[in-house]
Image: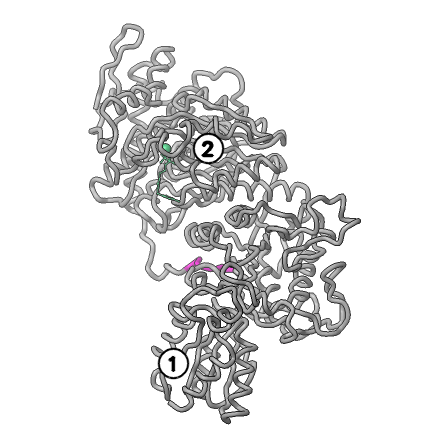
Amino acid sequence: MILEGDVDGAKVHLVRPAPYRAAQPFDTVSGLLQSELVSLKNRSYGVTGMGVGSSRSRVPEPALAGSLSSQQLVEIYRLMVLSRCVDDREILLKRQQKIFFQISAAGHEALQVGAALALRPGYDWFFPYYRDRALCLALGVTPADMMLQAVGAATDTASGGRQMPTHWSSRSLNIVSTSSSTTTQLLHAVGCAEAGRYFSGHPEAAARSDGDYRAFRDVTFHGDEVVFTSLGEGSTSQGEFWEALNTASNKKLPVIFCVEDNGYAISVPVEVSMPGGNISNLVANFPNFHFAEVDGTDPEASLRAFEAAVAHCRAGLGPAFVHGHCVRAYSHSLSDDDRLYRSNAEREADILRDPVTKMRMRLLREKILTEDEINALEKQADREAEEAAEHAFEAPLPTVEGITRHVYSEDLDPTSRVFATEQVQNAGAVGGGKAGDAKGSGPRTMADLINACLRDEMRRDPRIVVYGEDIADASREEILAEVKGKGGVFKLTAGLQTEFGSERVFNSPLCEANIVGRAVGYGVRGMKPVVEIQFFDYIWPAMHQIHNELALMRWRSNGAWAAPAVIRVPIGGYLTGGAIYHSQSGESIFTHIPGLRVVFPSNALDANGLLRTAIRCDDPVLFLEHKRLYRETYGRAPYPGPEFAIPFGKAKIVRPGAHITLVTYGALVPRSLQAAERAHREHNIDVEVLDLRTLNPYDWEAIAASIRKTSRVIVAHEDMLSWGYGAEIAARIADELFDILDAPVKRVGSMDTFVAYQPVLEDAILPQPETILKAIVDLRSF
Ligand SMILES: Cc1ncc(C[n+]2csc(CCOP(=O)(O)OP(=O)(O)O)c2C)c(N)n1
Ligand SMILES: [Mg+2]
C-alpha cells in the first residue's frame, strides 16, 4: 500500500510498512544510484556481503564512531528495509501455504541493526531470539539463508529443515542455534562468556587433542569477545532471565542483554506480568552492569547505546543491559491476530512509531535520499527477498533417511572400542590427592573412584570445569589452608578445588537451571563442563535446559553445534530417612530424551570407567550415581589407573545362570544378587543377573542372548513400576523375542507412590530382595 507523506512541505509517496501489502509499484532507478547501492552493499563496516550465494567474510572493526555518514545511514535503512521485505515475502508465502510458519522482526529493526553494527560477527558471540531477523541480516545471514529455512530445505544452514524459520544458527558468524523456548539462551550466553574468559586465561586448554571429544570441538577465542543475547520484555518474567543476570553480574562477564520491549507477550500487555511495567527499573540494582534505555525505533540512538555497552564489556568492566522500546508492527506471528486484543487507536499509534517509516522520513528530511532513490532501494530489497524465495523453492528437501543424523555425535561413538580399555592398568597407583585420595591397592568405594576419575581427567584435560552446589572445598579460598573443605554434600568432589583452583572448580548459585544452562554455553565453546545436581529430586528446574537445549543442540542445528556436558546426579533411596525429596528415582524420564546418554553404574569400578567415557565422549551424558552405593561394601574395587574406560551400551553378566534372566541396574544389582543366591539355595533356581550399566544406549544384544538361553526374564528396577524403564525393555522383549519365551515378561519396581520417611513405609514402597525372590519363584513355576 502506498501512502502520501509530507517532508519539508513536499509530497512524497511512501511504502506503508504493513504486513499484507500488495506488490509495490516502483519508479525507475538512475544508474548512478544503483552503483551507489552496490557499493553500500559491499560496505566496509559491520556487515558482510548479502544476497543469494554471497560469501561471508569477517569484518575486523565496526568503526562507526563519530557522526554517521550519509552512506552509513542509507545502509542502516537498507538493512531495515531488507528485513521488512523478507518478512513480507514470507508472509505472502505463508498465505500461499508455501511455507509453514512466519514470525517477523517488524518494528524491531532499528534496535537490532543498531546492535549488529556495534558488534563483530564471527568474533563476538550471539544468542538471539526468534524476532532477530534484522540483527541476523546485519550480521551476515543472507535472505537466501532465511528463505531456505522458511521452506525447510536440506540446505538450510541453520537446521537442515528441522527448525522453524527465524531459529537462527551460523557457525561462521558465531550465532549459536536458538530454540523456541523463551529465555533459555541467556544462560547459554553466560556460559559462553565464562568459557571465553577461561580460554584467554588458559590458552593451552584450546589445543586440539586426539583421543576424545576435543578432536571434534575446535576452539576460537580472542580475549575481548563480547556475547550478545536478546529477548522480549514478556520473557523477563522467566526465572532464567534473573538467573542469567545474577551470574553475569557476579562474575562481571562480558554479556550484553538486549530486551526488545514491544509491550506485548503475544496478547498479554506488559503491565500484567511486569510490576511497574518497566524492566529497566527492576534490574537497576544489579552490580557491575552498564545500563541503557533507548528508543528502539531509532537506529542511531540504538547503535550508540550498543557501542557504549560493547565498550563496557570489552573493557572487562562487566555486563550490559540495553532496553530498547520497540513497536510490534505486525501481530505476534502469522498465527496470531492482534485485532482481537488491541484497540485500533493503539495499533495506529504503533504505526506512527514504525522504525522503517521513521527512518525513511529522516532520509528524506535530511535530503540523504530522494523519493526515487528510496523507492529504488526498497524495490531492490524486495527483489532480493523474492529472488531468495525463488532460489529456496529450487533447493533440495531433506531426506527421510537423514532424520536421525546428529541425534548423537557422528564423530565419536561412546559404544566403540576406543573406550574398551576395561583391563585394570595401574592398580595401586594414586588416583587422587588430598581429600578424595584413592591411595594404596586396597578396595575403594564408588565415591573414591568417582573422585579419582574426576582428578585424573582434570589432570589430563584442561578444558574440564566442575561446578554445582556446594561442590567446592571452600569458596573463600583464603581459608583453604585452615579448613578441610566441603567438596560436595556427598564429598564426591573433595579436594578438586584445592588441586585445580577456583577457576576450574567452583560453587554455583543454588539454581539448577543456571547450572545446566551455563553448561550448554561452555559446551558450545568446546569446553567440558562436568557439573553436579545435588540431588536427583532437584533436577526438575533444570529439566527445561536438559530436555529442550542440552540434548537437542546437535540435532536441531543439524550437527553444527553440540554441548557434550556431563551432569552427575546422586539418585535413589534405601537411605532410611531420605524421604520423598532425597530418594526419588526417575531415570526413564531422561532415557525418553533423544540426544542424551544415561548412565547408571552399580559399583566402584564401573562408575570409574563409565565416568571416564562420559567425560571423554562427544555427547551430553546424565551420569546417575546411587547415593546408597557411594560407600557400600558391595562393589568396592582397587583404583584401576587413569586410562580405565568402559564403553557405553555394554551390559555385564554379574551372575551367570541358566533358568531365568534378571535384567537390572543401579541399587537393584546387589539386591538382585541376594535374591538370586537365595533362589539358588532355597529353590534350586539358577538366575542370570545382567547389570545394564548404561540405560541409553542399552545392551539389547546381551539381553537377547541371555533370554535365548533362559527363555524367562524379569526386568527389575527401583523406580516405580508403571511407565518405568522396565516397561520399554519388557515391551521390546515381548515384541522381538516372543517366540522363545516360555513365560510372560515379569517386572519388579517400587510401588506407584513416593518414598516415605518412616523406614517401615520406605521398606514396603521400594523393591527388596524378597520382592525380587518372589518374582523369581513365581516365574519359574509359570
Ligand atoms: C518457555 C516458553 N513459554 C511459552 C512460549 C510460547 N511463546 C512464544 S513467544 C511468547 C511471548 C513472548 O513475548 P516477549 O518475550 O515479549 O517477546 P515478543 O514476542 O513480544 O518479541 C510466548 C508466550 C515459549 N516459546 N517458551
Ligand atoms: Mg514483547
Report x, y in % for residue 270: 36, 30
Report x, y in % for residue 204: 68, 48
Residue marked by disc 1: 745
> Which numbered disc, 2 or 1, marks the residue that appears first in the sequence?
2
Q: Quadrant of the N terminus?
A: top left
Report x, y in % for residue 13: 24, 16
**Who is closer to the viewer here, 716 or 741?**
716
Residue 83 visible in image: no
Magenta span contains residue 409: yes
Magenta span contains residue 390: no
Which residue is located at x 35 percent, y 11 percent? 365
- Amino acid type at circle 2 is Thr
Which residue is located at x 28 percent, y 40 percent? 390
Residue 526 visible in image: yes
| Majority SS type along the magenta span | loop
**Who is closer to the viewer here, 667 or 14?**
667
Looking at the image, residue 43 lies above or below residue 176:
above
